[in-house]
Image: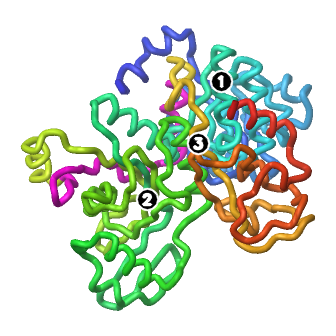
Amino acid sequence: MNFELLFSPSSFSAAGLQNVRYALTGAHGGFARTLLAQTRVIARLQPAVLCDLNLGGLRALCLELGYDAAQLVDCTDAADVRAVSPGQIALVPDVSLLDPDRFDILVEATGNPSVGYRAARAALQAKRHVAMVSKEVDAVAGVALARFAARQGVVYTTADGDQPSNLIGWVTWARTLGLEIVAAGKSSEYDLVFDEATGQVTQLDETFAAPELANLMTLGEDVAATLAARRHALRGRKTSATADYCEMSVVATNTGLVSDVELLHYPVARTTELADIYALREDGGVLSRAGVIDVFNMLRRPDEASFAGGVFVVVRTHDAPTWAMLAQKGHVVSRNGRYACLYLPYHFMGVETPVTLFEAVLHGRPTGAAQPTQCVVLGGRASADLKAGTVLQMGGHHHDVTGVQAVLLERGSAPADVAPLYLAAHAKLARDVAAGELLTLDDLQGMDEVLLGAWRAGAA
């Protein structure tokens, strides 16, 4: 990408715009803060409408970030929004008040499948671009929204700074170079940091004993055996997250890569090992086939750099001398020389999102595929026996669905009536569902019919 061209004055002049104006939902959230903070240092980017249920908290956040109090206008109805002067920022409590005349692109970050879908669809209907941050929306309705955007002549895109968009871009980069992608993925949210002096692992704000890892910090010749031993050393601690499955479903629809196994492999791995681990089984790795997506748990020592929720592709090496030279320069190449891991050890959340906003508005370019396909389904299996009448509540930091394990299914092998996880969220079970059973559409009552229609349209 030519960033100098992207942000040059001529780029804005050619588009006939002095500013790119955006609307933002979920504007009091963590992602929103990073975008609003970054906007303060970009002269030609303007938050025009900010939407959140907590208007008081939203105003306080904007003031904390240095926005002028006189610039912030609380609006409770459409007339209030229309009365806001150019250059001021409308603060609204409901997505129905997102006036498309005031913005060029919507950044959807509610995390709410139903609300987010309606906000995105309304923006596209008004021929406004949409940058989708709510992966929960995209996992159900992303394909339908992208198709609708194409018909409307506008852009529907993932947002740079979030792992799905970063990984989609990295896959696109690798394919542009003609590299054969064997696997692509990201690291899980929080590293496993092992202190050999104490035999303890720290993960975020939790510390626990795992002394066996001292003898497992080097990948053995039997890759699967080392990974199994590391997993055993963690004594059953959960290292997967619903959000990871959701993000990988978005990557899949935009790249055509699919899951190798429905729970993903989730190896406990060090960065230097990724090319050996994500090799085909006949070459000593864990994969049954090429062209897959996955997530790994980063294992490192306290003095080693984090993968920082970054993204990677593992590719086949096609010229041994080239990759031997690159290995000498410190790049990650497998021990047998047949695979290489190319990675970006970062994701910067809203700090990086302005690139997407300028690309979409000024150049009409999405991050991912112009026409994504429903090649996978983010589904759910009951993790316990669930009774008829149970409401499948969604909540928590990772937007888990109570009593349900997220699974990523290749669409061709999934039942035709499988229920998307975030369509099941907040629905009621129509029958008893035994532990291990896959949720189907017939199992659910009280689904959002509009969202169901979007899912069916995208899957058609």
**Closer to us: 188 or 353:** 188
Mark 2 and mark 3 in contact (Cβ < 8 Å)?
no
- The answer to whether residue 351 is visible is no
Secondary structure found at label 3: helix
Residue 187 is tagged as 2
Which image quarter: residue 291? top left
Residue in view at x 28 percent, y 31 percent: 178
Q: Nearer the N terminus, badge 3 or badge 2?
A: 2
Q: Nearer the N terminus, badge 1 or badge 3?
A: 1
Question: What kind of residue is marked 2?
Answer: Ser
User: Residue 357: where, in percent of width, then height?
Assistant: 55, 29
According to the picture, the residue beneath numbered tag 3 turns out to be 412
Q: Which residues are magenta?
A: 331-359
Question: What kind of residue is marked 3?
Answer: Gly
| Label 2 Cα neighbours within 10 Å, binned few <14 / some 14-19 / many ≥20 | many
**Closer to us: 64 or 442:** 442
Question: What kind of residue is marked 1?
Answer: Arg
User: Residue 36: where, in percent of width, then height?
Assistant: 60, 42
Q: Is residue 400 left or right of residue 231?
A: right
Residue in view at x 32 percent, y 36 percent: 174
Q: Nearer the N terminus, badge 1 or badge 2?
A: 1
Spatial CA span between label 1 and label 2 = 30 Å
Spatial CA span between label 3 and label 2 = 27 Å
In this view, 62 is above or below 266 = above
Secondary structure found at label 2: strand
